[in-house]
Image (spheres, coloured by chain):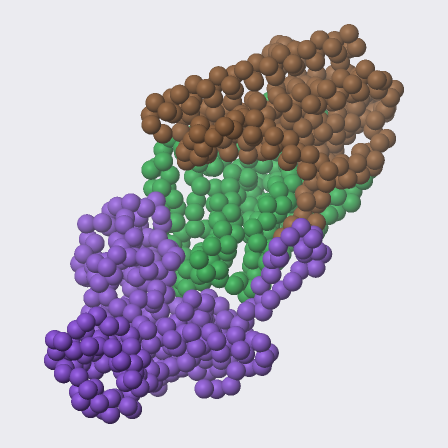
Amino acid sequence: MRMSRSYLQVLLTFARNSFVRDTMFRTNFVLECVSSVSWTLMNVGFYLIVFHYTPLIGPESGWGKHQFFVFLGTTWLINSLVQTFFMTNADDYSELIRTGNLDFALLKPIDTQFLVSFQKVDWSALSNFFAGLILLAVSLGHLCTRPEHPLVITPWAVALYVVYVLCGVAILYSLMIALASTSIWLGRNQTLYDFWFYITNFARYPMEIYNRGWGVPLWVLFTFVVPVLVVVNVPARILAQPLYPERSLGWPLAAFALAATVASLAASRWVFQRALRSYRSASS
Amino acid sequence: MYRGDFALGTLMRFLPIVTQIFLWWAIFDTIGGAEPGNAAVAGYSFHNVVAYYLLSMVSRAFSSMPGLASGIALQIRNGEVKKYLVQPVDLLGFLLLTRVAHKLAYYSVAALPFALVFFLCQRFFVGPWPDGLQWTCFVLALLLSFLLGFFLEACIGLLGFWFLEVSSLLFVYMLFNFFLSGHMFPLDMVPQPWHAIVDLLPLKYLAYYPAAVLLGKVPRDHLVGGLLSQCVWVVVFIVLARVMFRRGVRRYAGYGG
Amino acid sequence: MAIIELQQLSKSYWVYQKREGVRASLRSLFRRDYRAVHAVRGIDLTVEQGEFVAFLGPNGAGKTTTLKLLSGVLTPTAGQARVMQHVPWKRENAYRRRFALVMGQKNQLWWDLPAQESFRLHQHIYRIDRAQFRQTLDELTVLLGVTKLLQQPVRELSLGERMKMELIAALLHSPEVLFLDEPTIGLDVVAQHNIQRFLKYYQQKRRITILLTSHYMKDVSALCKRVVIIADGRIHYDGSLSGIVDRFSGHKIVTLQLAEGQDPTHLDRFGSVVEVEPPKARLRVERRRVPAVMAALLNAYAVEDVAVEDPPLEEVIAEVFLQADDAAAAAATAALPAGPR
């Protein structure tokens, strides 16, 4: 009990210090918020064009305009949480390794992975979280008030949604920290960061689109080996598509997503510990 | 540290296209119904869309200038630019030459992965083989897109003479570049009245235009005119960069560096 | 029971060897050359509670590596170590709560924030209770004279002030063992002196155990009774500071002040002449010959004043380092481990 309380207190101090720091560079902070939100707005523009030409993404997939915008909103929620809490830290981590400043983290009487993963909070990235919430509210509003089959959102669905969004964050975090850990062996490796972006790129679309041609092996790869496809798909379906029971999530996928989360976290922990053993502590 | 990194990195650049292809595949399946082969979006068949993405990668390879603007801004900020005021070297000319050398070196290595991807995807290139005029215009458009990309981004970097922090400006530029150059989708798909605006901007020459020329999406009698207006944009940005540099240097000297 | 015990502690690692030239770089794409670095080669050391020990040695001698091994940042290739009954590289929280490492060349405070915020973070990480934290912080800031600087962003502090803040951060949890890696590097004389004074006071008051590495002889002579000379990854000397001279220098310096009119030439009959600046002259004389030489000198010249001194410590130590280097080079050529001295 005392243990978890102290971890929470450290976490709050990290968050607070980051916030103090952000407010010291206020103009920069505002600019970053604006630019990240405008990026996401451009994304909406693109999909408005797409839905200008098609009613659905994939025949009978159930991903119409508003359902898809629920999907998109979920993507933003998850991505912004990952960016807010982990992106800077994963980036700093390879810097800590390069400069040898990881020494200080290793000296502290607290779990090193915890310390490295949570050190900084990038509050400006949270602006996309709110953008995601707005998009979610608007498109769910459309779905709930449409004349045929208005969508009904149960508290149960909302609770599940929150759980699976957090699972998604955990899976992406695991992938990120595992990739960052490899810089102990490889040095700072730009390709790895590109790799992260390219892989998560697969998570940004409904998994049905891979259900054709040579997409099936990709679907298998990104569902079962690197489970990024369940990150957004599972929560988005829970909220947007409960009306189609025959196509809806299905318990197997939901259960799998939970298992994938646990497995990812365990795997990333293993990689992190292995990497630490090879740490050489550069002298400045 | 670089073992295999490079070729792998180039191949991975094509990964985002893979997801785009599946997205459009699903869309064409939806609107084409039983005969997806005949479906078209703004005149593009599914094969056209894939071919377009691959070709726009080529134009982006010419027009993208990673690190140029931020590099110039950094040199201004830390005073390194002073070197060019004393030495008989022209900053823009020097940077242009390094960039050319860099691109040449890059493509001598990257040509292989590019060729591999195009070979694997050759079935998406349907329709008549482009004729001499199209090829000529394509190559010229690519070279001009290199110059346009260079001077456009140089201008943004030179804003560093007036603003301390250009990184957010640069971000906005990249944002517009990403969506309005045709990197994300063929610009023909933009509905009116937006299309008219996008068509007037120089950004379309950075990705869309060379690809559209080779795919035959530009009417033959517009080919030369299109190239001419691309030339005009290049000249505009060359002049703008020169003027900005001269003014900036004067302002700089006025402050005593 | 000794507080720190090292037995045959060794650390080697492989570093990627870069080679010059295009052909070599191309070759390294396929096959890389690695070189083994033996940073620490079998160190035995015992430190009792309350000692203040200095590690002296040239750059790359293995001092910092030893401290990092003792802090658990690195895992040794061979050998054993116990600090307060803990094996450092297991990194148990119980151990990490009881010691601190300060590195003069690195900084752990949040750069853009006042040091106060970093201290508060340490309070939570080390779970120091509020009252205790307040009291320790007040005491340390007063001692180091930085109370007014607590609210200032760290990046605006001078190097000396920053070092003081680093020290405070390390001492907040009242460690029983403190490792200091060149804590005064790059500081001006006043700041160096301040930090020395503080360390001396703090160590005497708390009776904590301190291991210090430094390039400045002033630090060492002001603070430590016991000195360990490390060169080439091995211990070459372990004892008192003055003992170094007895052990490594067989010479004394004889300074003569000759009476007016005396010709200071031909002094080299008595020993090697260090310098002649009439009427003064300095000679290096073998220790066991000092009495005989003195008698002969006083016999040969009219002497107004005479002094017999040990050679300056720095010179002696530099000589030891040089010898160690030569021995290492010889060992490397022979590809055989150097024998015990």
- In the depicted view, which residue is nearer to us: A131 or C150? C150
Q: Quadrant of the C terminus of chain C?
A: bottom left
Is residue B125 visible from the viewing direction of this image?
yes
- In the depicted view, which residue is nearer to us: C137 or C190? C190
- Which chain does green denote in the image? A
**How many numbered tags mark residues here?**
0
Residue at the image position 37 percent from the left and 24 percent from the top: B253
- Which chain does brown denote in the image? B
Q: Is residue C296 above or below residue C4?
A: below
Rendered shade, chain C = purple
Residue at the image position 47 percent from the left and 37 percent from the top: A125
Residue at the image position 27 percent from the left and 50 percent from the top: C158
Q: Is residue C319 above or below residue B177?
A: below
Query: Residue C302: x percent and y percent?
Result: 14, 83
Q: Is residue A205 above or below residue C118?
A: above
Question: Looking at the rendering, which quadrant does residue A1 occupy?
Answer: bottom left
Query: Residue B195: x percent and y percent?
Result: 64, 13
Is residue C233 visible from the viewing direction of this image?
no
